[in-house]
Image (cartoon, helix red, strand yellow):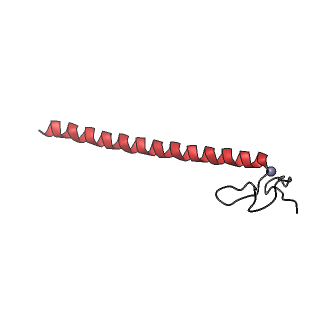
Amino acid sequence: MLETCTICDDETGRAGAGDDSLYLEDGTGPYCERCFEIRCLRAEVERLTRERDEARAAAEAYRDLSWDRLERARAALKGG
Ligand SMILES: [Zn+2]
């Protein structure tokens, strides 16, 4: 039986599940090579986007913390 790509329905040119078929780590597939590459790139973009958002959130948290400290130091100087 010919295996077809789960996205574009093209023949994958591979033997079938459990053989050398192209599945993603999340279990989706099989894909033809073109769609597999696109899915991999998309997954990579999603990963990088997540990393960027996490880095941004961390930077903002740090900024807020630094701001709080500065405000407290200012208040302490005024009060003392
Ligand atoms: Zn395809």
Name the image quarter holding residue 66.
top left
**Residue at point 79%, 57% (across, down):** 6
The x, y position of residue 79, in whole percent, is 14, 40
Query: In the displayed structure, would residue 3 be above or below residue 55?
Result: below
Q: Residue at x 20, y 40 (%)?
A: 75
Q: How many marks?
A: 0
Q: Is residue 49 above or below residue 10?
A: above
Quick check: 24 left or right of 70? right
Where does residue 3 sit, x and y in percent of width and height? 84, 59
- Asked whether 33 or 47 is in front, the reply is 33
Q: Residue at x 60, y 47 (%)?
A: 46
Residue occupying image coordinates x 76% and y 48%: 35
Farthest left residue? 80
Q: Residue furthest right?
A: 1
Tell me the quadrant of the picture where the N terminus can be found. Answer: bottom right
41 relative to 57 in the view: left or right: right
Q: Quadrant of residue 61?
A: top left
> Toward the viewer: 51 or 35?
35
**Is 6 in front, or is 74?**
6
18 sits to left or right of 64: right
Q: x and y percent of residue 29 in the render?
A: 74, 58
**Location of the C terminus (image quadrant):** top left
- The x, y position of residue 18, in whole percent, is 73, 62
